[in-house]
Image (spheres, grey):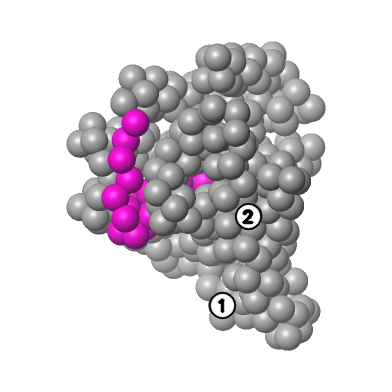
Amino acid sequence: MPWLLSGLGLVILLLAGDALVKGAVNLSLRLGVPALIVSLTIVAFGTSAPELLISIKAVLDNAPGIALGNVVGSNTANILLVLGIPALLATMHTSECETRKTFNFMIAASVLFIALAFRGVFDWIAGLVLLGGLAYVLGDAFRDAHNHRKADQGEEEPEGADPDMPKWQIAVFLVLGLIGLPLGASLLVDNATIIAQAYGVSDTVIGLTLVAIGTSLPELATTVMAALRRQADVALGNVIGSNMFNLLAIIGIASLVGPIGVDPEFLRFDLWVMLGASLLLIPFVFLKMDITRLWGIILSALYALYLFVVLI
């Protein structure tokens, strides 16, 4: 039954997250918010809402391993799995993308996160530091959007926006998302913890594997479709933006709810795997290389190796 309820919780999370994103994107279109800001704020929050709610619920349930493992595991999965699997289906022409600044922000966020982890706990002080970093990143995005509009280059509609969507439908999407996300998070965390205890597996390992992969599924689906449609900028931007938001916003907010203790194993292994996986993007960001099927095999194999090491 816990496995069934965990699966149900995951399905509810995915459906509710999708509903929230649709509602938020179309609401932003009605309000005239620029597409860039929508992508970096509302959509980023919507797709990362499952991670946020799971981390907050884990903190309240005194399962800090799930809270931290969820974010660290998701960031590792986002690069190795979420970019690896789509590359097996179609080459992603990342050589055409300009993501240097956002990539630098992501690496800076990763280094800041690791430095704070060595304090032994993510408390309210660490939370405010992380949220300060998020405020800087969002402020930079607003400046870029303002300059873009001043250049009179025009704004594209956010992906998934429907100018003809009635107001009542937007409201339904928002309500379903806001109700479904906490329900799904509660089901998944409660039953993942039961599974961990039954099999003698630590909540840290469950957070790094089951929960992390589950909450990375929206990013995986988006990236697969982007790869098939030859939209490499969407694929790479999706991963970099999601990872940055996970580090700065998810743990930043969860740390204000309650202190999150850092398992020594994170300091010895998992945080460095996350940083190493992030640095693997350097050839695609700075050297203008494409993510070919060979790279897809390499990235997917590295993630399989990581799971093997974590689970043994």
Q: Residue 23 location in percent, x, y? A: 66, 71
The type of residue carrying mark 2 is Leu
Residue at position x 69%, y 45% from top? 2
Q: Residue 136 location in percent, x, y? A: 30, 55
Mark identifier at residue 187: 2
Q: Up-down: is 232 above or below 52?
A: above
The type of residue carrying mark 1 is Gly
Stretch of the chain drawn in magenta? 242-263
Residue 246 counted in the magenta span: yes
Residue annotated with mark 1: 32
Q: Residue 178 location in percent, x, y? A: 60, 70
Where, by quadrant of the figure, is residue 128 drawn?
Answer: bottom left
Determine whether, in the image, residue 133 is placed left or right of residue 9. Answer: left
How many residues crowd mark 2 within 10 Å: few (<14), some (14–19), many (20+)?
A: many
Say which element carries label 1. Answer: loop
Q: Say if residue 269 shows up in the picture.
A: yes
Mark identifier at residue 306: none
Determine whether, in the image, residue 211 is placed left or right of residue 240. Answer: right
